[in-house]
Amino acid sequence: MLGLKFWKVKGHSMAPLFPQNSAVLVCNWLNFLPIKEGHRVLIKHRRFGIVVKTVAVVDRNGFIWGKGENETSETIEELGPINKEQVIGRIIYVNKVAM
């Protein structure tokens, strides 16, 4: 993926912020900038596949700890540390669908 790409949100882990079936516009060239707490990112997770998460913490070793916005989402601990190479891109726009 070069530049910008739309991805469809599946599941409810980011609802109500990103309802299921919403489209998110992801920018991969922003990966060159530091990833910070509060950023929304698309991640290629080893266990859960392609997921959208909010960055909860970037630890002192540079690992990213993500979280969902819904109480039914995986916990930060279940997701575990994510290295920057697993980040597909940063979400820059959301086209929400009605829930």
Image (tube, rainbow, N blue to C red):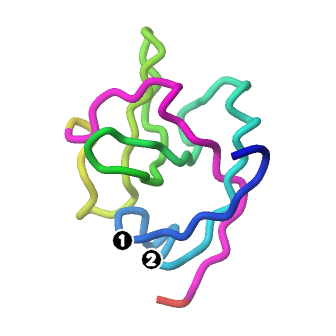
User: What label sits on residue 67 in the rendered view?
Assistant: none
Q: Is 80 included in the stretch rendered in magenta?
A: yes
- Residue 93 x, y percent position in the rendering: 71, 62
Q: Which residue does the image show at 66% across and 23% down from the upper left?
A: 34
- Residue 26 x, y percent position in the rendering: 67, 53
Q: Which residues are magenta?
A: 78-97
Q: Is 3 included in the stretch rendered in magenta?
A: no
**98 displayed left or right of 76:** right
Q: Which residue does the image show at 39% across and 29% down from the upper left?
A: 82
Which residue ends up furthest to the bottom in the rendered image? 98
> What amino acid does circle 2 point to?
Gln
**45 displayed left or right of 30:** left
**Given contact means CB atoms under 8 Å apart, are the residues at marks 2 and 1 in contact?**
yes
Q: Is residue 28 above or below residue 36?
A: below
Q: Which residue does the image show at 61% across and 72% down from the upper left?
A: 23
Name the residue tied to disc 2: 20
> What amino acid does circle 1 point to?
Gly
Q: Quadrant of residue 5?
A: bottom right
User: What label sits on residue 11 in the rendered view?
Assistant: 1
Depth order, front residue of 44/20: 44
Q: Which residue does the image show at 53% across and 34% down from the upper left?
A: 37
Q: Is residue 31 above or below residue 26?
A: above
Which residue ends up furthest to the front in the rendered image? 1
